[in-house]
Every structure is written in structure tokens, then in C-alpha cells.
Amino acid sequence: MIKQFMAAAALSTAIAAPAAQAQSNDIPNGKIEYSDLDLSTQEGVAELDQRIERAARFICEMDVTSTGTRVVSKAKRDCADAVRKSAKKQLASVIERAQRGG
């Protein structure tokens, strides 16, 4: 069975909800695959954190630059922060269970 986590991030889902959604209090949803990770190890948790970070940057279009500036807007930064926090909060119990041997 493939473990998938409906988190506030998306790697495998088509996302058209950039920073504008962060302004409306709606955190975009998507999937982060973690079935291939051993979350009982620091390495597994570190890789999951990297996946969350990449997903947050993707969903909030952090790497998309506006004409005339390379500065990431506050709305995009806020969006990415919300995505990270939500994903980590929702995955905390999964990580805890894995580290307890469950």
C-alpha cells in the first residue's frame, strides 16, 4: 500500500494556487510521498523535511520571479510558511509513530 499524505503541499498534484491563496487563509492541499522513507531515522526525517520544503516552494511559486525583481514577495513567503507549518503539524504523529517502532 502506498502511503500518501494529504499535506499543505504538492509535488504530484497540478497546482495553480500560488501566493494568492495564502492571502485568503486557504492553504493549498496536495500529496507528499513518504512511503519510501524510513521515518525512524534522522536521515528519513531530513529527507521528508526537504520534500516539504520543495513542495512549499513549488506550490507557492517561490522560484518564479517577477519582472524587475528577484525578491520573493511577502505573500509567497507567507504561503510557504503556512504550507510548511501545516505539513509538519500533520506529519508529526506519523513521524512519532515510526520512531516508536510502530
Image (cartoon, rainbow, N blue to C red):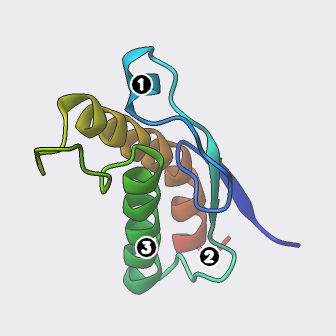
Residue on which the image places disc 3: 45
Residue 43 higher or lower than 94, as above or below:
below
| Residue 14 rendering spot, x and y as whole percentages | 66, 51
Name the kind of residue labelled 1 in the image.
Ala
**Alpha-carbon distance for marks 1 and 2?**
40 Å
| Residue 45 rendering spot, x and y as whole percentages | 43, 73
Name the kind of residue labelled 2 in the image.
Gly
Q: Earlier in the sequence, mark 3 or mark 2?
A: 3
Label pair 3/2, CB-CB below 8 angstroms? no
Residue, x 37% and y 60% (percent of image)? 53
Residue 64 higher or lower than 80, as above or below:
below
Pick the residue in front: 51 or 16: 16
**Alpha-carbon distance for marks 3 and 1?**
30 Å
Mark 3: secondary structure = helix
Residue on which the image places disc 1: 20
**Alpha-carbon distance for marks 3 and 2?**
14 Å
For residue 66, which quarter of the picture? top left
Decide if residue 4 is on the left or right side of residue 62. Answer: right
Name the kind of residue labelled 3 in the image.
Val
Residue on which the image places disc 2: 101
Decide if residue 12 is on the left or right side of residue 70. Answer: right
Residue, x 53% and y 63% (percent of image)? 95
Disc number placed over residue 70 in the picture, else none: none
Q: Earlier in the sequence, mark 1 or mark 2?
A: 1
Label pair 3/1, CB-CB below 8 angstroms? no
| Residue 8 rendering spot, x and y as whole percentages | 53, 42
Circle 1 packing at 10 Å, graded few (<14), some (14-19), many (20+), is: some
Residue 95 higher or lower than 23, as above or below:
below
**Furthest residue to the top?**
24
Residue, x 68% and y 53% (percent of image)? 13
Residue, x 68% and y 70% (percent of image)? 102
